[in-house]
Amino acid sequence: MYQFGAKGQRPVESIVKVVLDMLKQHPNQEFTDSQIERTTRERIIGQPAVVGMLQNNPKIDYDPTTRRYKFRPHYDLRDKQQLLQLLHSRPTLMVDPNLLESYPGIDEDIS
């Protein structure tokens, strides 16, 4: 069941997905509410359902002190070298969607 934002606005889950996708594209950057709005063109300020889902999303780090959001990958990998170290230390590791979200370009490094 979808939660809807303000009158005529898209479902909350849809807005959260857009924001999460944007954060994945900028894995080392932190964004404020207003920066998220400018980048995604989605309204989140004044939308408590959206803000709550973002702040409690396991794939998003939210810092209440700075009020900034950042993508939190399941695997803390930043480059091909770290990927190779992980694969050597865990030879039975399967390539899964969580691994593919680690950093932009990882799919090319795996090939």
Image (cartoon, rainbow, N blue to C red):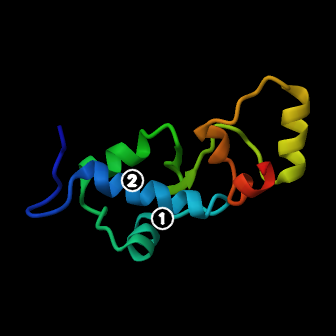
On screen, residue 62 above or below 87: below
Residue at the spot 63% in from the left edge and 35% down from the top edge: 96
The quadrant where residue 95 appears: top right
Q: How many other residues sit within 10 Å of disc 2, few (<14), some (14-19) or many (≥20)?
A: few
Residue under label 2? 17
User: Residue 106: where, in percent of width, then height?
Assistant: 73, 53
Instruction: Tell me, yes or no, if residue 67 can be seen here.
Output: no
The answer to whether 39 is drawn above or below residue 99 in the figure is: below
Q: Residue at x 34, y 51 (%)?
A: 51
Q: Are marks 1 and 2 in contact (CB under 8 Å)?
A: no
Q: Quadrant of residue 38?
A: bottom left
Write down the quadrant of residue 73 in the picture.
Answer: top right
Q: CA distance from mark 1 to mark 2?
A: 17 Å
Residue marked by disc 1:
32
Quarter occupied by the N terminus: top left
**Residue 43, percent across and down?**
29, 67
